[in-house]
Structure formats: C-alpha cells, structure tokens
Amino acid sequence: MSKDIDSLLSKLAGTRTEASLFNPYNEVCKTTDISTAPGLRQGNLRLFLESHLNLKTDLLWIFDTPDYHNAKLSGIPLVNSSLYSRVEDLLGMTEHFENAGKAHNVNENSKIEENLWNSFAKSSTHPLVWNVMPFYPYKGEDMTSKRKATKEEVIKYGEFLRSIISIFKPKKVVAVGREAKAAVDLLEIEAVYITQADALDSKQRRT
C-alpha cells in the first residue's frame, strides 16, 4: 500500500494547476511558506495516510475543498500546525508533522476544525478525512479569499479522491456538508450525507 501512497504523492507533486488554484504539494506561497514547503507538505500527508493505513481505517469522511489555514499550509486535510500534536496522538504516530510556514502565528483554526478534532478525541473511531479536491481555490490574485470550486475542477481532479477510495477501500463513505455532497454526486461516488453539525456528534462514527 505504501507504493500506492507513493504514486498518489507523485501525482500530486506533478500536477500543474490553473491560476487561482493553489497546489500545496508543488507551489510556494510567498506570504506564508518557507522555501521547502511543498516537500514538507508531501511528507506530512504521507505520515497522515500511512498512519491511517496502519490503523486499518475503513471510514472515509469527505469535506469541501481546503481552507487557507489548513491543508493549503500543512498538506493535511483539516489540520494546521496548531493541531499537529493532537492529531499525532489520536493516530498513535511516532513521527511528527513538520511546519511548512514561516511562523506558527499564520495558522488559525476554524470552529469546525477545532470542534471536529475535539470530537474525534472523545471517540474510539477516527475516520480518514479528505477534501473533495486537494487544491485550494481562491479569487483572482487574493489568495486569502477562498472561492467555490467549479464543476470542471471537481471533475478534472476527482482522480485524487478516487485514489484515496482505491487505497483505503472504505466500508462507508460520508459527505460532510452540501458542497461535499454535490461534489461526490458529480463524481458519481456513493456517499451518505451528513451536516457539519452531525459531524461533531460521536454517534455518527458508530453507524
């Protein structure tokens, strides 16, 4: 399976995205990143995925596209450096994620991220979280302003979500929020829909 992760990371690193679509695995944000950020983010994602493989995770939760302060900076879905220790503990990791940003203070947690990982900490089941698309869509030249991914982008880069499903072969796929559900429907991937509020309920991870 590690070869499958190698292949996924290679594809991510080799994908050239359009303007206003940031690829954290081969691009450097001059505002927030250190020069080696793409390689560090690749390494972070590898640790994240390999940890879930070791845990034999068979539940996949799909969220909307990355936000400015999580995977765009860290390379890990719904995680930034202020959450590193918490995620490492939850996944039983012995290696550590690395900070790809110029300073820790550029990281901010959205309420959904903070509450989500707090909720995971109270449960024995930790789903693999993934974005409908691993790239960060933004408006014009303002990278801090997130936009909605187009249908064409979701379809074009849907291969990465399909790769995750192929690698982990989840028994259950869950789309969290309307944007995620619309994307998986577009890709004709069967998934159960839950709201973000439902995602914070530990009972959802036992059904």
Image (cartoon, grey):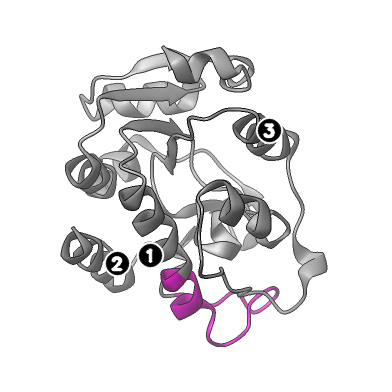
User: Residue 100: x and y, percent?
Assistant: 60, 75
- Verify CB contact (< 8 Å) between mark 1 and mark 2: yes
The answer to whether residue 113 is above or below residue 167 is: above
Residue 31 magenta-highlighted: yes
Residue carrying label 3: 112
Name the amino acid, label 3: Ile
Instruction: Identify the image quadrant of the N terminus.
Output: bottom left
User: Residue 176: x and y, percent?
Assistant: 49, 24
| Horizontal relation, residue 39 to residue 168: left or right | right
> Which type of secondary structure does the marked residue at label 1 adopt?
helix
Q: Residues within 10 Å of mark 2 (few under 14, many from 20)?
A: some
Q: Using the image, tell me which numbered label, if any, was put on residue 9.
A: 2
The answer to whether residue 70 is above or below residue 169 is: below
Name the amino acid, label 2: Leu
| Horizontal relation, residue 168 to residue 63: left or right | left
Task: Mark 1 or mark 3: name the one nearer the start of the chain.
Answer: 1
In depth, the one of 205 and 102 nearer the eye is 205
User: Residue 3: x and y, percent?
Assistant: 17, 66
Q: Quadrant of residue 111?
A: top right
The residue at the point 57 percent across, 63 percent down is 74
Residue carrying label 1: 46
| Horizontal relation, residue 47 to residue 58: left or right | right
Measure the alpha-carbon separation of dots 1 and 2.
Answer: 8 Å
The answer to whether residue 53 is above or below residue 31 is: above
